[in-house]
Amino acid sequence: MARPNKPTDLDETLWGTTVRDEIATIHPRLVLPGTAVPVEAGDLQAVDLELLAAQAVLDADERSTSTGGRFSVVDLCAGASRAISRTGLVAERTIGCGTAALLRA
């Protein structure tokens, strides 16, 4: 993962394990497997596309603070994905930024 000032010798797998171990030390139940929860799909017709787009842009703008306020297609993609995730819509996962394809369905 590309991060500014990331140590070049950082082992991501070891780091992830260390963080999970720390969480388990703080609260052991947080690392136990959870029970499956049924998913109820949201209604595509009930989605307000204008509101969804505004939420996506707002999210992208908030993400852009780490780069001095410049946001990219990646920020917009992430914002759109997060906005859609809050709607309750359920669809097949696609590679890349496929959120627009979901709304065209």
Image (tube, rainbow, N blue to C red):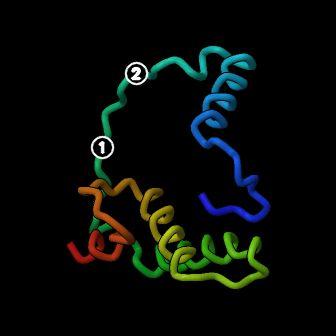
**Residue found 28% across the figure and 63% down from its top:** 94
Q: Residues within 10 Å of mark 1 (few under 14, many from 20)?
A: few
Q: Earlier in the sequence, mark 2 or mark 1?
A: 2
5 to the left or right of 15: right
Q: Position of residue 1 (x, y in %)?
A: 59, 57
**Residue found 49% across the figure and 65% down from its top:** 83
**Residue found 57% across the figure and 21% down from its top:** 31
| Snapshot quadrant of residue 10 | top right
The amino acid on which the numbered mark 1 sits, given as a three-letter code, is Glu
The amino acid on which the numbered mark 2 sits, given as a three-letter code, is Thr
| Snapshot quadrant of residue 30 | top right
Q: Secondary structure at mark 2?
A: loop
In this rendering, the answer to whether 77 lies above or below 29 is: below
In this rendering, the answer to whether 36 lies above or below 1 is: above
Query: Whole-Å distance between the Cαs marked 2 and 1?
Result: 16 Å
Foreground pick, 13 / 57: 13
Q: Position of residue 90 (x, y in %)?
A: 29, 54
Q: Which residue is mark 2?
A: 35
In this rendering, the answer to whether 17 lies above or below 12 is: above
**Residue found 57% across the figure and 37% down from its top:** 13
Q: Quadrant of the C terminus?
A: bottom left
Disc sitting over residue 52 in the figure:
none
Foreground pick, 59 / 20: 20
Q: Position of residue 25 (x, y in %)?
A: 72, 16
Q: Which residue is mark 1?
A: 40
Q: Position of residue 4 (x, y in %)?
A: 75, 65
Toward the front, the furthest residue is 9
Q: Secondary structure at mark 1?
A: loop
**How many numbered circles does the render carry?**
2
